[in-house]
Amino acid sequence: MKTPKELKYAKTDEWIKVEGDEGIIGISDYAQDQLSDVVYVEFMIEEDDTVSKGDTLATIESVKAAADVNFPASGTIIAINDVLNDEPELLNSDPYEAGWMVRIKLDDHSELNDLMDAETYEAYNEEREG
Amino acid sequence: MFTPHTPKEIEEMLKVIGVASVEDLFSQGPANHRFPELELPEPMTEMEIASDLKEISSANASTEDFISFLGAGAYNHYIPAAVDMLLRRGEFYTAYTPYQPEVSQGTLQAIFEYQSLMTELTGMDVSNASHYDGATAAAEAANLAYHFFRGKRKKILLSRAVNPQYRATIRTYMQGFEDVEIVGDDVEDGFTGDIQEFSSKVDNNTALVVVQYPDFFGRIIDYTKLVEIAHSQGALVAFVFNPTALGLLKPPGAFDADIAVGDGQPLGIPLSYGGPYLGIFTTKEKYVRKLAGRLVGETVDIEGKRAYVLTLTAREQHIRREKSTSNICTNQGLMALAATVYLSLLGKTGFKQVANLCYQKAHYAAEQISKLDGFDLAFGDSPFFHEFVIKTPQPVSKINLHLENHWILCGYDLNQDYPELENHMLVAVTEKISKEDIDDFIMALEEVAHD
């Protein structure tokens, strides 16, 4: 399972990559593995929407489940990865690069302090695996 | 007598939960209501009961005894005997629809065929496995549109010429949805005869426009322009259709409707005092993820043989919980089977023939009635299918009383739903009505006019 060091992780398995004032958001390798084959992504937001931490970003449907993706931080939507509408399987094959979901302008960097670093997230996953 | 538990079992259960007697289980209820005297008659033999029940049921008036011109959403069509015979087969006859593919290939295949027939009939891409009735299917259309726009579009535009019961059901379903506004069907809105005017009420806050086809008054209205205007505002359009009419008319799919719903009762289901009926729900492929209810798909099993399973279940309530479009997880299995058998028996030609007979007989009746003194077709030259509105010289209730003496049931008193339609009755004519029936009806009406 890949857990890139430069990312921050939420307990609900989203990652965020900070680039200056902006953040890129997706779901973790662990999350895509739990979901199994993703067949559909429905974005719940549009460009320019302002969102709060915890709001629903998208619903992901896999062959065995449906799950919500939540915003790990508040901000304004800059871009949505529309490619996922036609190629939802990118979430499985490349969750950290081609499978990115949205880019937002961050409201408040301090919100990110609640998130986990890669090491803590890995430990958290191991604990869940029991 | 059916005894679910023996005294010994009851005693054991009471012991486990630590209660002295069954009576103690009800001690929370007010004492005077706990064990009321039921004042039941003395026990009777089976023969006596059968005779009593027969006497009670003989007080009913049925369409077996009367010539019926009642419609308004439920229609008295002929049902081939094979429909009931197949429905009652033990393999199908169950109160609950079993969906497990490993034990229910027959049921699943029947539903799949039902879905295929419905898409063929409506010209739409997808049909679900059905809802309870036409009204609840119409309400699910509002549900779909609301969720498609994720609650951002707040307006649902209803035509006043949509069945009043359907509009009431849509309002019931939409209770508790934040800020949803249901408009367009007040007295001052009129009956949507003027499509230009009705279309002007669609705006970019409109999630759904609901029209009926033919409408509640039987009129066939060309909704081409309305659909165009609604789509230009980004809104969805739902047609409430009569399935029999689609034997003759251009289907909703050809109007580019987004959703087409209707009651399947005319397709081999008896009137039965209002139910069980069948809710048909069809839509475009684009909206399939927001579709409520069950959906059966065709696939192949591990040996490559054709097989049927529920599909796209992740959109449903048992997986998505509160995120699903609807909490409806079941269908009207037996009634969907009735419609499937009915349509299969009639075939394309037979079905068209039924529709054509309804059309021709209704037009003959309308023409004859309009020649009577004091009776007029309320909507003049508007084209209609098998139902039409007549303006009567006296209150409809009075006319109906007179007609009952002639063993004629007619017609639906529109005044009960439409205060502006005093002395207006809705008349439906199906293939079961003969020319002689119509002529009797005309003669009886003539007597009323001369009263």
Image (spheres, coloured by chain):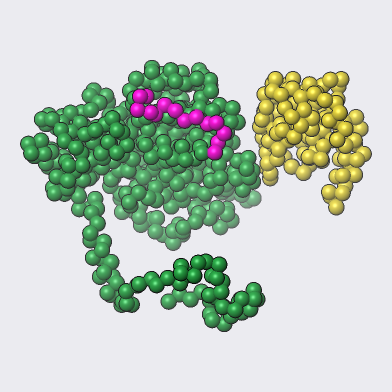
Chain colours: A yellow, B green
Residue B400 falls left or right of residue B108: left
x%, y% of residue B192? 35, 24
x%, y% of residue B171? 46, 37
Q: Nearer the viewer, residue B291 or A33?
A: B291
Inspect the magenta stretch and tell me whether residue B179 lies in it. Answer: yes
Question: Residue at position x 67%, y 30% from top?
Answer: A43
Inspect the magenta stretch and tell me whether residue B366 lies in it. Answer: no
Q: Nearer the viewer, residue A45 or A85?
A: A45
Q: Is residue B128 above or below residue A55?
A: below
Q: In the figure, residue B349 lies in which quadrant? A: top left
Quadrant containing the C terminus of chain B in the rendered view: top left
Quadrant containing the N terminus of chain B in the rendered view: bottom left
Residue B207 falls left or right of residue B375: right
x%, y% of residue A99? 77, 29
Question: Residue at position x 49%, y 56% from top?
Answer: B96
Q: Is residue A65 visible in the rendered structure shown here?
A: yes
Furthest residue toward left:
B450
Q: Which residues are magenta?
A: B176-189
x%, y% of residue B148? 57, 31
Q: In the figure, residue B448 lies in which quadrant? A: top left
Q: Is residue B74 above or below residue B363?
A: below
Q: Is residue B342 above or below residue B237?
A: below
Q: In the figure, residue A91 lies in which quadrant? A: top right
